[in-house]
Amino acid sequence: MNKPQPPSTSNFIKQIIDADLASGKHKSIVTRFPPEPNGYLHFGHAKSIALNYGLAQLYGGKCNLRFDDTNPEKEETEYVESILEMVKWLGYDYGTALYASDYFDFMYRAAELLISEGHAYVDSQSAEQVQLNRGSFSEPGKNSPDRDRKIDDNLTLFREMRDGQHADGTHVLRARIDMASPNINMRDPTLYRIKRATHHRTGDKWCIYPMYTYAHPIEDAVEGVTHSLCTLEFEDQRPFYDWLLGKLADGGLLKRPLPQQIEFARVNLTYVVLSKRKLIQLVAEGHVDGWDDPRMPTLAGARRRGYTPEGFKLFAERIGVSKANQVIEFSVLEDCMREHLNEVAPRRMAVLDPVKLVIENYPQGQEEMMEVPNHPQKPDWGKRQVPFARELWIEREDYQEVPVKGYFRLFPGNTVRLRYAYVVKCIGYDKATDTVRCEVLADSRSGTDGANKYKVKGNIHWVSVKHAHEAHVHLYDRVFKESLAQGLEHLNPDSKRTIAARLEPSLREARQDAAVQFERHGYFVADSSDASTFNRTVSLRDTWATANSP
Ligand code: ATP
Ligand code: MG
């Protein structure tokens, strides 16, 4: 299951790569995953990571992990570490992480080259004037009065900006392209701004910083990236991406072939938000218990909830890549997790809503060990011993005083099998002690000849009262009530419930990274903070749709 899953074979990105390899434009491919270290990775990033690393693996190329850390104001080392941890958790070996800030010197040289060749100028208009003169979709922009400043003066001014001789906001460096372009991004975009800010890696070395749209193409080119995959909102930036790299190649600073930007639709999921800004709000306002709250669609939250890297890869492959914006049903992701967990999670017995059951004809003090398979379809996983005794916990819903039609579990007079143990007959219920009363059919023990004598429809799980591991279980549900409405007024007030459960004793040794299936309930994992707390990863079936339909 640890083998990398290549992205869907029908994807259009693959077709572009195939053509580039066939034509000899590239001998091998280089992709990259370029997070901005200004927040924690979310499920959308998992898709991007799986896509970029998946393509590199499929074609025997490589994928760079590069921090897009060119904006000094929002970035933090804490995020860098978390991102590294999560990429590793997803199972990708990123070798040495790269940092866009390592290319600041190169970016500066590139800017001087553009100035020297008349492709960039220092603009001393105020930010408002620049904005005003940019025009609109229907109106062309107006040339800045500084657009024809002499090359030498531009160079001098730009060096003074770098040397800290001008105040923040007094000048910017702009590309000299076309103020009448129908694409507003081509109307002399800003390349550099003056900003006295301490950078998490370069400290106070710089007081001018490159704009993202300038920095990003250069980062790709410097690293020899062949296919630069980004989300759809950058489509209008592609002409500038090509313009910039073309000018730097013409000037001898970059070698051809240049990287190609390819856009694909960002992943949106129902019932969650996938935007760092909105996720920050959930944490800051205390709607969840932090970044790694298992309800958060962050990878840190996912890991704690018990979602698996293999489940994410399956998801990335299943949804493929698209050119059109798409909203994926959250249940698609959950199904991927179930599919993987079904393969890897051993089965255990856990009673989540306990009521006591007493077997009145079973001797006081007697105990038996029952042999219970770890996975009913995988005999090679072996069996474990589970203690059985006179007093057991069962699920409250497995008993009905007056059975509804079609109910075949415990009610007075009915027989059921206590899974992997005996058949018992219900003889009543004692209100005073809230106890279901039963009698055991002594020759019905599972695995013995007598077991087949009894035909029962109900087959319920149990945990011995004396041996039970009492634990808290968090039952997580969707963060938002509405599939597409993502305002805070649509938060699901029941997204987390905590209950006191009774677990079979082997679960005392549960590990945080090892999923288990609680039979009939779903997949669970011990919480990272405390092994006697379990988190529900996902139920066995999608119950949301039925429970929430009008
Ligand atoms: P956010 O909007 O949440 O801040 P972002 O796009 O700004 O996300 P980056 O750190 O810039 O986050 O993203 C790193 C990479 O992950 C980019 O290549 C980006 O396109 C990709 N990515 C981010 N969100 C998604 C998503 N929802 N679906 C697919 N790819 C995504
Ligand atoms: Mg971003």
Image (spheres, helix red, strand yellow):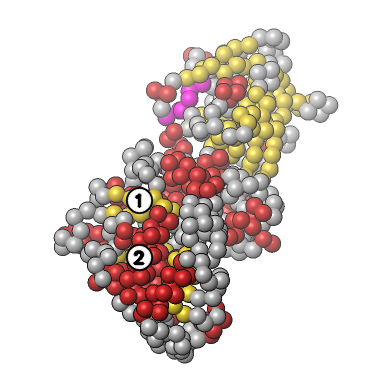
Q: Residue 339, percent across and down?
A: 44, 42
Residues 279 and 30: in front is 30
Q: Which residue is mark 2?
A: 109
Asked whether the viewer can see residue 75, the reply is yes
Q: Which residue is mark 1?
A: 64
Residues at marks 2 and 1, CA–CA distance in whole angstroms: 23 Å
For label 2, the crowd category at 10 Å Cα-Cα, with few meaning under 14, some 14 to 19 and many 20 or more, is few
Amino acid type, mark 2: Arg
Q: Is residue 165 left or right of residue 290?
A: left
Q: Residue 435's quadrant in the figure?
A: top right
Q: Is residue 84 left or right of residue 270?
A: left
Name the residue: 68% across, 43% down. Answer: 497
Q: Is residue 374 above or below residue 110?
A: above
Which quadrant is home to the N terminus? top left
Q: Residue 230, percent across and down?
A: 39, 62
Reading the chain from its start, which is encountered first: label 2 or label 1? Answer: 1
Residues 244 and 461: in front is 244
Read off the magenta span.
372-377
Query: Which structural element holds mark 1?
Result: strand
